[in-house]
Structure formats: structure tokens, C-alpha cells
Image (cartoon, rainbow, N blue to C red):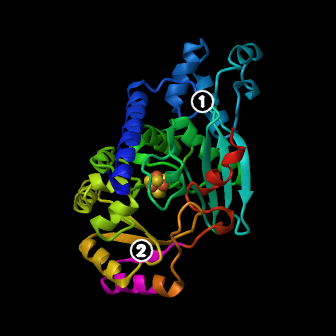
Amino acid sequence: MPSTTQLQSQNYQELRSEALASSEQINHRPLTIPPLLGASKAELTEWVQQQQQPAYRGQQLHQWIYQKGARTLSEISVFPKQWRATVAEVPVGRSTLHYRAEAPDGTVKFLLRLADNQIVETVGIPTEKRLTVCVSSQVGCPMACDFCATGKSGFTRNLERHEIVDQVLTVQEDFQQRVSNIVFMGMGEPLLNLEQVLAAVRSLNQDVGIGQRLITISTVGIPGRIRRLAQSQLQVTLAVSLHASNQALRTKLIPSACQYPLENLLQECREYVEVTGRRVTFEYILLAGVNDLPAHALELAQHLRGFQTHVNLIPYNPISEVDYQRPDSHRIKAFMDVLKQRHIAASVRRSRGLEQDAACGQLRASRGAEVS
Ligand code: SF4
């Protein structure tokens, strides 16, 4: 009889193939427009010219969808009335707001309804100097991490570039403030949808105006994909979710890790540093009594010896689906002290909006009954 881990792994294999297949399908389809969002100025110009309009309408269209927040072409008042009527139904690619929740610390979580009625989660996180958006890259996630609400809800499909860019514009409009940072840490595994994620990063950088270095792509690791990300020559920040200090523990927490030994993952990270000259950040969720002992910290420090890195320790936000718990502050400090003694730069990530189902995918899960 197969063990639970084997079953999880088998399930992960099927879902992962589905995500990759849908990613390849999108990849091999030329990035034609519409939906218009996510298209560059040059693409928009080409499109308006195909519609027998002068080239400068491309510049106007670009300004209206990225800066003025136009959701339909009929509201672009600088376009001739007659042409507006002709293209009124052309989709810009904006979502509609399904649900909004604001935490006392100012964090705002959004559930956005896509054109096919799927729902994705996006979070706006304000601090004194920044407005960070945590974006989703997939509807659901096939990785099935044991501690994650999104992982428990299964995988539906990859997001397209306009659906990723839309999340950032939605937060920007809601806060009436420019977004400064983006983290791909919402629903989904970005490297399983790499081409669309890269297309969205290009647009967020060139069309929305967010610096590449202020965009973080987070992954639990897909064999060969960190290498492909390095080849893209972008200056984005890579965050790798380790969450365990050895292969056996990692496989329990992240079923996909059975396909990707920790040593191989770390080797790909080293290559990433060599190729890009950028450092890699490691993420480590602290689960009480599971991976938070000083011995785990010591093991982690040994793996990361010689790495130019920073470790983000994330005390777990409990969810109802599993009984993992958040460690107390003494254990968190003890873990961090071991890393610091071993000269590994580390910090504890402060939880934002804990009251509003803060863990990845939790908001969508808790509002699932409302999603039709
Ligand atoms: S933690 Fe990330 S990769 Fe793992 S299941 Fe959740 S969304 Fe997917």
C-alpha cells in the first residue's frame, strides 16, 4: 500500500505536469493582444495600427491603461467616438473586486474575480516608505506543501501576464499610492508558470515602472527552472523557500522535494549567484517542534556556509486544515542566535494582517463558500 508521502508525491506529479503543460501551451501561443494589459508600448502601437489608427494612439492607450486605470476602451476619451464604439468590447484584462479585507495594521487583502470567474488572492502591504504587493502566479497551486492553505485547495490553472499585472494596478489604485515592491509569494509556484511570470515582470518594470531589483520571485524549487530564470538576465531578487534543514524533513513538508534533493537545489542556487551576481534569499517557515530546534538551525547553517545570503525566518501562521503551530518567541530567538553565531545573516519576518487570514492562500480558502 503506498504511504501518504508517496500518494502526495504522485498527486503532486500529476498536478505539476498539468501546470507545466498549461504553461507550455501559453508559452507556445504567441503573446498576441488582447487582453491589452501586459502589452508593451510597441505591441500596443502595432495593435492600434492593425486597427487602422495612427501610431500615436498606441502611446495614448499605454498611458490610459497603465497610468489612468482605464478598464474599457470606451472610457478613453481621447479616442474618436466612432472607433471607441468599434473596440468597446476589446478586453483590457482587468479583474473585478470580489472581496476586500483590511487589517488594523493597514494590510489589505483582495480576492479578485478573473474573466473566467476564477478567484485569486492579492495582498497590499504598506509600511512607512513602501507599498509592497504580494501577487499570485497561479489559481491554486500544485505543489501541495503540507503547511499551506493554497496547497490544500489544489491547482486550477496558470495565470496569464495581464492577470498578474492587474493585481499590482488594483493595489496601486486602492491605496492611491505607487507600488514600490512586488513579491511573488501569493498563490502558486511562479517557476511553474515562468514565461508568463517573466512577461509580467517585464511589463511591471517597463510599463508600470517598478525597478527589477524591487521584484522578488519566490520558489520552493523546480529542477532546472532557477537556471532558466538566471538565463533571463533579469535583475530580480530570488527567494528560495527551504523550510527544512535536511532532505527527509523537506520531503515531508514539501512533497515535490522528493524530486529535487536539497543539495541539487542549493547547487542550482550557487549557479544562479555566479551567473547573475545577485545573492539568493532563503525563506524558512518556523513550525513549532517540527523544524525549529537549535539542531535544525545548525544543520541549516552548515548547508548555507559560504553563501552570500540572507535567511528570512517566518514564524508560522496556523491554519485550520493542519495542526502545525507557531513557535514561541524564545525558540525563534534561539534559532536565529545559532544562525548568527555561524555568521549567517537572518531576520524574523513580522506577520502582517494576522487577523485577516494572513497565511498564503488562507483568505481564498476561508471565503471559498462565496466563490461561485
Ligand atoms: S507554499 Fe507556495 S509552493 Fe507550497 S503549496 Fe503553498 S503556494 Fe504552493
Which quadrant does the C terminus fall into?
top right
Q: For the residue labelled by badge 1, is the local secondary structure a helix, a strand or a loop?
A: helix
Q: CA distance from mark 2 to mark 1?
A: 54 Å
Total tally of numbered discs in the picture: 2
Q: Which mark, by number, is residue 59? A: 1
Q: Amino acid at mark 2?
A: Val
Residue 42 screen position, x and y as percent: 50, 28
Query: Residue drawn at (42%, 87%), measured in percent from left and top?
Result: 334
Going by the numbered disc 1, the residue's amino acid type is: Gln
Q: Nearer the viewer, residue 183 or 74?
A: 183
- Magenta range is 333-349
**Residue 325 placement, left or right of 309:** right
Task: Establish whether ligand 1 lies closer than 8 Å to the Cβ of label 2.
Answer: no
| Residue nearest the viewer, comparing 6 with 305 | 6
Q: Is residue 279 left or right of residue 267?
A: right
The quarter of the displayed image where residue 52 is located: top right
Residue tagged 2: 290
Q: Is residue 113 above or below residue 47?
A: below
Q: Secondary structure at mark 2?
A: loop
Rendered view: 244 above or below 36: below
Badge 1: few (under 14), some or many (20 or more) residues near its Cα, within 10 Å?
A: some
Asked whether the viewer can see residue 346, the reply is yes
Q: Are marks 2 and 1 in contact (CB under 8 Å)?
A: no
Q: Position of residue 169 (x, y in %)?
A: 63, 45
